[in-house]
Image (cartoon, rainbow, N blue to C red):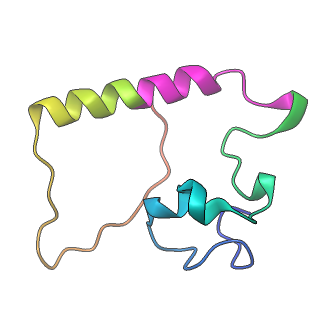
Amino acid sequence: MHRHPAFWEAPESCEPARFLPARATGRPRYAYFPFGGGPRRCLGQSLALLAMQVMTGLVARTHRLCLVAGQHVKSEAALTL
């Protein structure tokens, strides 16, 4: 569902701007639901989102991230413990 071409332009590319409210207009509610939806939604959703913000802040505070010319960035599913 998260990569279905009927709901996403260029579903295999990393494009954070696709989540802006202006671009989300008309997209079905559950076209993107990383924590599930409805009454069985993930109980850890709030904790996971908070942890992501804290980790991003810690990395941004101590490092400057930039892409190396000619390198391809490939996303990889992983767990954060």
Tell how many labels. 0
Q: Residue furthest right?
A: 39
Q: Which residues are magenta?
A: 40-52
> Residue 39, percent across and down?
89, 28
Front residue of 23/16: it is: 23
Q: Main secondary structure of the magenta part?
A: helix
> Is residue 81 something one can see in this rendering?
no
Q: Is residue 5 above or below residue 68?
A: below
Q: Please tell me in which quadrant of the rendered image residue 47 appears.
A: top right
Q: Is residue 79 above or below residue 2?
A: above
> Residue 44, percent across and down?
64, 22
Identify which residue is drawn at 15% across, 79% down: 70
> Residue 24, percent across and down?
64, 61
Q: Please tell me in which quadrant of the rendered image residue 19 appears.
A: bottom right
What is the quadrant of the N terminus in the image? bottom right
Identify which residue is drawn at 59% across, 65% down: 23
> Is residue 32 something one can see in this rendering?
yes
| Left or right: 32 in relation to 78 | right
| Left or right: 38 in relation to 72 | right
Q: Residue furthest front?
A: 22
